[in-house]
Image (cartoon, grey):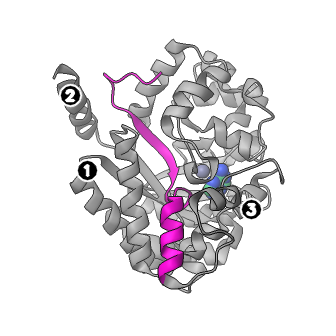
Amino acid sequence: MIDKSLPLVELHRHLDGSIRLETILDLADQHGIALPAKSVADLAPYIHIDDSAPGLMAFLDRFEHMTAVLVDVDACRRVAYENVEDAKSEGIDYIELRYSPWFMAESHGMDPAEVMEACADGVRAAERDTGVRANIIGILSRTYGTETCMKELDAILAHRDHIVGVDLAGDELRYPADLFKAHFKRVRDAGLQVTIHAGEADGPQSVWSAIHDLGATRIGHGFRAIEDSALVDYLAEQGIGLEICPTSNLHTSTVKDYVSHPIKPLAERGVKFCLNTDDPGISAIDIAHEYDVAAPAVGLTPEQVHQSQLDGLQMAFLGDEEKSELQLKVAQRTAL
Ligand code: ADE
Ligand code: ZN
């Protein structure tokens, strides 16, 4: 269960994987984009995950109708704004939203740097209006290959002041982390934090590479670290935290079922983690679902869930002062 006396943070949510069904319909209507359905109920089966095609890449194919409606920068700004509004209604105090500007720009030929800026604009405006603290992580979509990712990085770094870190997402199996050493050298030289999708579709070597080749201080998923005892010890010793998204892992078929999720043994060996949604628009979940349904289903005790909420704040890409401010704000709210 969520402890309301602590800040609730979400560190792993894809902005482009959490577009409201209503917004998809509305944007499609405004811009004459054909969709397979005309109502929320009829559209849901096309966007929400089902059992028809297993695997990470089949999961990522579900983004198709979402990116199809990102027709211009106004649409991007709106989606970004609504992401923060949704975080507010879920009771989230601090959220890190991530997106790949190339992926969002692609279907309508937008300029990825302009997409970067429009989303940042939307996030900042919603931050002011809702009071939710939000930060942005730029994503390099590894599936496009190294050259395009370098251009994507240019677009991201053009808005360096709007972001706190950079991630590598997409097809982990076909595009291993070590291909992107030069990219993440630039990221670190720019003074940005590094979190990498690793140990989700691929094994422990991918996590080692994210840490040693790219300089990751947090790992997106990373649960396959359980296959390498030395890596588990290393994560625990170095305090490299895992951004765990249990329901997403089921939906990408990277774990068989909740019971088989390795987060409990990892936690028992001292690995830090926090609970996240990943792509709530596709998984049809919210953060409460991960705390109330997924966490007990993977076997976490209430104490471990409590600890993960504390660890989430510690893992956040925020300065110590900003973390204290968040704690103070929540303490004041709880005292009311
Ligand atoms: N992009 C969006 N969700 C993702 C995931 N679970 N793994 C890799 N890339 C992603
Ligand atoms: Zn992710």
Q: Mark 1 points at which residue?
A: 130
Residue 204 versus residue 125 in the image, above or below = above
Q: Position of residue 277 (x, y in %)?
A: 55, 42
| Distance of label 1 from label 3 (alpha carbons) | 38 Å
Q: Which residue is drawn at 74% across and 36% down?
A: 224
| Amino acid type assigned to the residue bearing label 1 in the image | Thr
Q: What is the x, y in percent for residue 167?
A: 54, 56
Label 1 packing within 10 angstroms: few (<14), some (14-19), many (20+): some
Residue at (63, 47) in percent of width and height: 283
Name the N-terminal-most of marks 1 and 2: 1
Q: Can residue 227 be seen in this view?
A: yes
Q: Say whether residue 190 is visible.
A: no
Give the labeled residue for mark 3. 175
59 in relation to 261, above or below = below
Foreground disc of the pair 3, 2: 2
Label 2 residue SS: helix
* Residue 16 percent across, percent down from the top left: 53, 62
* Residue at x-position 53% and y-position 17%: 304
How busy is the neighbourhood of tag 3: few (under 14 within 10 Å), some, or many (20 plus)? some
- Point out the quarter of the image occupied by ligand 1: bottom right
Residue 2 among those drawn in magenta: yes
Tag 1–tag 2 contact (CB < 8 Å): no
What is the x, y in percent for residue 89?
37, 43
Q: Is residue 181 found left or right of 137 in the rendered image?
A: right
